[in-house]
Image (tube, coloured by chain):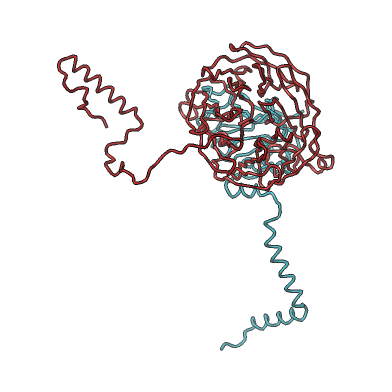
Chain colours: A red, B cyan
Amino acid sequence: MTNFDHPSMIGHSGRGARLAGRLAMAALLVSAFSAQAEVPGQLGALGTAKLQEETSIQKAPPSDSKRVYVMDPGHFQMTSTVYTIDGKNTKLLGMVDAGKLPHVMVAGDGKFLAVASTMYSRVARGKRDDYLEIVDPQTLEIKADIDIPEGRFLTGVLERLAALSVDDKHLLFQQFAPSPGVGLVDLESKSFVKVMDVPDCYHIFPTAKQNFFMHCRDGSLLQVSYDNKGNTKQKPTKVFHAENEYLLNNPFYSNSINRLAWPTYEGKVFQAKLSESGAEFLKPIEVFTDKEKADKWRPGGWMTIAYHKGRNELYLLADQREKWTHKLPSRFVFVVDATSGKRLRKLELKHEIDSIAVSQDGSPYLYAVSAEAKSLFTFDAVSGKQLGTLDELGRAPSMVFVADK
Amino acid sequence: MKNNSGFDSKIEKLARVTASKTGRRGFIGKLGGFLVGSALLPLLPVDRRGRLNEAQAATTGNLTRSGFKPQDKDPKACDYWRHCSIDGNLCDCCGGTLTSCPPGSSLSPSSWVASCYNPGDQQTYLIAYRDCCGKQTCGRCSCVNTQGELPIYRPEFSNDIVWCFGADNDAMTYHCTISPVVGKAS
């Protein structure tokens, strides 16, 4: 409530004093309208009654290896929600707002969350605004809001169309139109640098010393090194998969060990170790036996693959299915040794699961999201025992993220 | 007390005949089997996605893991043959038609394509999935079909992209999708 007998006006006279008083009044009016903490005066005493109990705003515990984020884009809705969850007890800690089809990235050590969003000035029309927010994982407050060009590639939410650099100092985001490019953001100076021209390649897999790789339509990778101004050097790798070996849209990639694992529609997993020196392609793994292939076991869902670094295990979400049903959810996870391909476990999740992730600690949890059930299910990644459920997660939660370390 | 009616006599006769031909233990066993079977039936591992979707919305013909089985009768159903690779909302359910956008939206001149088999004339056609843009997502008749759908590095066959490139006012906001025919697939 504005007090027009403000002390700043008392004891002054003359035109100068009147002018000063009016300026002060104007300032007060502006502050009254802009201050969100103001309570309307007409509420009276009851509306602002003193409480017997203390109230507060919760602060989440520090992020740890079992912190998990579930993203609900509501299919293609204009706003999205990122649910922040303590995986240890499957407890919801809070939420982060995001715009249309956001990209969500967890810092390697979990110390911050980066969310790239798009909003329009008039709901679904008007001026487009793309921006990047850096979120504190405990307070869920926005620590930085960085404007970026309106060129973020809008797709059904996919992994690695935007990525943090391995040292978390840069953020890279893919542009599709008007021409292929990768936007470079300097997180230390909180500023956009440049859209770097690239050929018709997709996904972003960063490595050390300001390098990243992309996957190109001919089946090769493209290595791109960049300087602080966005000048690049680019060179392709060999073609590592055939044209008809279609790679599912969400690969696994670890920023900390630069390990890439990428399943095909039929369950063959291509792997590579990436570095500034180039790409080392590993022997591909066939997750399913010939009999299982004959019985129509295939991967399927949205985020279908996860990897546990310490155990060197690959987790593939799969079910018995006809061809061309690769985006429908699955009820099983096949666990294989990531070097030999040897089958280690087959976990039955007993839910229709779209996306999986695995925590990287010594007692890993498997996180499984179901868009249909609007739920996160938590499992012991070794025994397969279900440990918890968190339901009512928005409209269509479809992605799940954990810290890389 | 009422006199025995004809109905009562028939029931009594039926009961005596049944009792004379059926052992009590056999009858109870069969009854028990029926009851247990009825109780276990819902626990069998059948795919209930279609039933759930029917209960929650008017959308029918949703894809299951058993694959796409096209029909040529109902264009508002997800299994209508032209929708073999659609991912999104059918404009036909949102105020548009199979080939026109709902009022107030804008039609993109770009699209992903797929070859879809029409069981009506047993021909295969190339379908262009054009998005109608500039409005909030319609939400009705939501379908995810992936017949011949390719990864995003083959964008012309990928249904994950917001295909609003070139729509009026550069509105990259997805409303729904139409399914016009490009021509017969060669």
Q: Foreground: A180 or B186?
A: A180
Residue found at the far front of this picture? A362
Residue B177 pos. (x, y %): 60, 33
Above/below status of A150 relative to A305: above
Which quadrant is the N terminus of chain B positioned in? Answer: bottom right
Q: Quadrant of residue A357?
A: top right
Give the percent coordinates (x, y) of residue A46.
Answer: 29, 44
- Locate residue A329, reporting x and y percent: 67, 41
Residue B9 or A298: which is nearer the viewer? A298
The picture quadrant where one finds residue A14 is: top left
Q: Residue farthest to the right?
A: A290
Above or below residue A131? Residue B34 is: below
Q: Is residue B159 above or below residue B8?
A: above
Asked if residue A269 is positioned above or below residue B27 in the image, the reply reads: above
Q: How many marks?
A: 0
Query: Does any portion of residue A364 appear in the rendered image?
Result: yes
Q: Is residue A47 left or right of residue B169?
A: left
Instruction: Let me know if residue A357 appears in the view.
Output: no
B156 left or right, relative to A72: right
Residue A62, image x, y percentages: 54, 34
- Image quarter where the C terminus of chain B lies is top right
